Amino acid sequence: MDSIRLEHISKGYDHLKVLEDFTLDLPHKEITCIVGPSGCGKTTLLNILAGLDRQDEGQVENLDHDRISYVFQEPRLLPWKNAEDNLKFVLRDKIAARDLDDYVKSWLDKVELLPFRNYYPRQMSGGMMQRLALARAFAMPSDVLLMDEPFKGLDAPLRHKMLELTRKLWGEEKKTIIFVTHDIQESLLIGHRVIALSTRPARILDDITVDIQVKDRKIGCVKLARVEGYLYDLIEHGSLGLSNCPRITQIKQRYYDSKQCL
Amino acid sequence: MSKISPHQNKFTAALVFLGLWQSAAFFTSPVILPSPWVVLQGMAAYLVKGDFYVDLGLTVFRGVSAYLLSTVLAVVLAFLIHYFKPFERIFYPYLLALQVIPRISWILLALIWFPLNSQIVIFIILMTILPVITINTLEGLKGIDGALLEMARVFKIKKSKITTDIIFPGISAHVFSGLKVAMGITWKTVIMAELLTVQSGLGAEMAYAKTSFATDRILSLTLLIVMIGLLFQKLLLKLERHMERWKFNHG
């Protein structure tokens, strides 16, 4: 399958240019993380992919807008429906009626919410709600899953658990995941590939394949910390609007030289 | 010191009220203020009279049909105003104007426009409560969570399902708040309209009582109308609690 291609995308709001001549390939069945400073255009990029926003110029290729699911920053659950009905709301027209009950229950089970299937969102914790949102997105028959800083409001241990759960579900479903975050560590713990963006208009500072086994990706892992430090430096300078400056070239040169030495 | 239960509180308040009423009645003429006992006897007299139920039925029919008709029209109108800009431009200023038109103007106009039957009463109630429910529904529509609509768009949810599963529950609290206000206005208006226009219903019965200075009958009818109003208010609250049960569910 050809990868999803964003070609020469430009997008602005009034006089604010968020994306300008932005080109990116997103391979299928991989987790691609997009990291960058707040307000650099990451969410705009996802919204263009989701069809919620339209680009001013450029095109998106090899993407079926009807087969997309989304985990938003907030869970976006219907407060008047319980956990089970929140899933059914999205799945009813997509899964055969005779299979729906079992299908929904199996997904609630996967995210450990089966005992809470009658709970309304107001009775759930933030983590439970986000698990339900995760189940909804994975259970939806889609090829591409967009995730916009989905674990932003959660504490560190819970965030870590959610990343593991996402990785586990991805292992079962193999959806193409585009995961947007401003947390470099989060992107390195989950992604096959990490794309670092500069401040707006967003430009790609670097595109890294994370060649560390998932089981070795632990907080405190030296290899991970090195990449994290590099990306931090890169984004810090990129967020100053210095995406083409010699300092950025220097940081990249130093990182790739040291990588070769190891 | 032992605590007083809410039931005891209500009972004490009722006793104090009846005591004050009885005392005031003792020092005044029954034409000005009859005693609670006389009023109670008047109520009982109405309840055993066969004709009373015809009038009661007419009043309830007029009130309920005007209320239901207004609810449907108000919700449709609010949707049209909210989703179609030309409708908003045409109708919204009139809606605001409708709110301040005195009830008595509608009564006088209705007397000219309609024959003297239930239509006239239904029309007067409709014109009085329509803006109340419409404006509340509009507020609900303005407050619909855009994030939920966006989620529904991404997950390719059908428009009909968005309406029934997001928009209706989303506006429900505002609609009910309008319906509760409209409920009180409906019972006040139905009596006033019957009193001043048609020759039937509890309002007309009140008009007869007034012409013979039967204060006890006026008070008996007032109490009966209050009881009907409270009964319907209770039914409405039950319906609201059922529709918004997710707010009260504790797992």
Image (cartoon, rainbow, N blue to C red):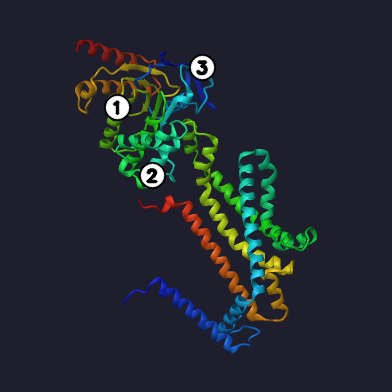
- The residue to which callout 3 is attached is A58
Which chain's residue wears label 1? A
The residue nearer to you, when weighing B59 against A196, is B59
Reading the chain from its start, which is encountered first: label 1 or label 2?
2
The residue nearer to you, when weighing B25 against A14, is B25
Reading the chain from its start, which is encountered first: label 3 or label 1?
3
**Which numbered mark, 3 or 2, is in the foreground of this view?**
2
Q: Tell me the element at label 1.
A: helix
Q: Amino acid at mark 3?
A: Gly
Residue A175 coordinates in the image, percent (x, y): 36, 23
**Which numbered mark, 3 or 1, is in the foreground of this view?**
1
Residue B96 coordinates in the image, percent (x, y): 66, 51
Report whether residue A39 is seen: no
From the viewer's perspective, is residue A144 above or below residue B71?
Answer: above
> Pointer 1: residues within 10 angstroms few (<14), some, or many (20+)?
some
Q: Are marks 1 and 2 on the same chain?
A: yes
> Pointer 3: residues within 10 angstroms few (<14), some, or many (20+)?
some
Q: Tell me the element at label 2.
A: helix
Q: Amino acid at mark 2?
A: Pro
